[in-house]
Image (tube, grey):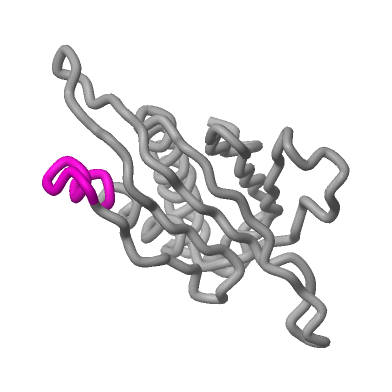
Amino acid sequence: MNYTEIKLKADAFTLSIKPGQPLNGWFTGTISLDSTYLQNCAPRDELFYCPFEDWLELCDYIESHINKLLELGHFESQTWVTSDLMLQATCLTGELYYEYNELAGRFVIRIMVKFGSDEDANYANIGFEGGVEVSEVIAFCQALREYVNSQKEVLVGVSG
């Protein structure tokens, strides 16, 4: 499968991850936030790199939040960040339930991306918060896991 873009679509925004060429076990590519509410706001795209494990940890974080919402009904997770602090996610409260044996409902998610450079302290954390369907966030995590696993296979094949 060709992974050109992995998206998470929430009510108020879309997070897009566009993989580039992996480098020494690290994800490289771009990450962007888009919102119909702020069409003229710049910048929106940022070069992005992180260990592949960060993406798996993000999926674990989101899936853990879903399980806590199902168990407790009301739950807000602590903020998750990538190892280089370029991306933050916070899963907030919502309502999840089973309908015809399918998980349904929605919760609120907040995504923040660091745009700019640490070198001269010329950066800003820019983000959005909005409701997201649980089916959408599960599909996002599945696509992200598939991408990471495909890259692990490529990396093992290259080194083995």
74 or 158: nearer the viewer? 74
158 or 148: nearer the viewer? 148
Q: Is residue 71 located in the magenta-colored stretch of the structure?
A: yes
Q: Quadrant of residue 73?
A: top left
Locate residue 83, reporting x and y percent: 49, 75
Locate residue 113, reporting x and y percent: 64, 61
Locate residue 108, reporting x and y percent: 42, 44
In which quadrant is the C terminus drawn?
bottom left
User: Would residue 86 be found to the left or right of residue 69 on screen?
Assistant: right
Range of magenta residues: 65-74
User: Would residue 79 be found to the left or right of residue 154 on screen?
Assistant: left
Name the residue located 64 percent from the left edge and 48 percent from the top edge.
Answer: 19
Q: Is residue 124 located in the magenta-colored stretch of the structure?
A: no
Image height check: is 108 above or below 160? above
24 or 38: nearer the viewer? 38
Image height check: is 157 above or below 102? below
Name the residue located 68 percent from the left edge and 47 percent from the top edge.
Answer: 33
Name the residue located 51 percent from the left edge and 67 percent from the top edge.
Answer: 51
Locate residue 82, reporting x and y percent: 50, 68
Q: Quadrant of residue 58?
A: bottom left
The residue at the far bottom in this view is 120
Query: Dominant secondary structure of the magenta stretch?
Result: helix
Q: Quadrant of residue 114?
A: bottom right
